[in-house]
Image (cartoon, helix red, strand yellow):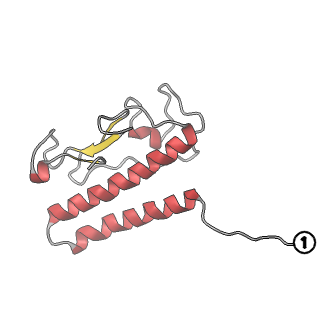
Amino acid sequence: MYTKNTSGFTLIEVMVVVVILSILAALVVPRIMKNPDIARKAKLAHDIRAIETALKLYKLDNYTYPNTDQGLEALVIKSTIPPEPRQWRQGGYLDSVSIDPWGFPYNYLSPGEHGEFDLYSLGADGQPDGIDVNADIGNWQ
């Protein structure tokens, strides 16, 4: 009898590697870049990708993204705000909700204005709109 051995990576393993690489890049990039604003924007892009990955894993388990009221905290602790997640993963999807490179919390809307959800930073000034380092940067860009 012939048995075919298959090996490969699960979606979870691939997502964990992506998150680890994003974290490493976010730590290394600011140290090698001479311009701190460019380094902060690079860290922001990596953070957004890592949080997006966690949100997608949440949706795979629970069939929907956390709503705006539940917020990104629903990735760390199980939300009791309706609709409660059906199959929330023990241990969560993130260790903690990070803050943007300028020290402000990330903004999250679900449903979003630009897609299923909007995840963004208001920039260095923490105010909507702005230009250069004060510009809003989101997952839709």
Residue 106 visible in this rendered orientation of the protein: no
Residue 29 visible here: yes
Circle 1 SS class:
loop
Locate residue 60, reporting x and y percent. 54, 44
Quarter of the rendering occupied by the N terminus: bottom right
The residue closer to the viewer here, 140 or 31, is 140
Residue farthest right in this picture? 1
Q: Going by the image, does 15 lie left or right of 105?
A: right
On the image, the x and y values in percent for residue 103 come to 23, 49
Q: Residue at x 39, y 40 (%)?
A: 72
Kindly indicate the quadrant of the structure image that contains residue 88: top right
Q: Residues within 10 Å of mark 1 (few under 14, many from 20)?
A: few
Residue 120 x %, y %: 27, 44
Q: Residue at x 10, y 53 (%)?
A: 132
* Residue 11 rendering spot, x and y as whole percentages: 56, 57
Q: What is the residue that sits farthest to the bottom in this orientation?
A: 32
Type of amino acid at the residue the image marks with label 1: Met
Please tell me in which quadrant of the rendered image residue 108 appears. Answer: top left
Q: Is residue 53 above or below residue 7?
A: above
Q: Report whether 70 appears left or right of 42.
A: right
Q: Is residue 51 above or below residue 21?
A: above
In the image, residue 3 sits, relative to residue 104, either above or below, namely below
Residue under the image location 63 percent in, 67 percent down: 8
**Tally of numbered tags:** 1
Residue pictured at 46% horizontal, 49% vertical: 54
Examine the rendered structure and indicate whether residue 38 appears above or below residue 94.
below
Residue at the left extreme of this rendering: 131
Which residue occupies the extreme top position in the image? 82
What residue did someone put label 1 on?
1
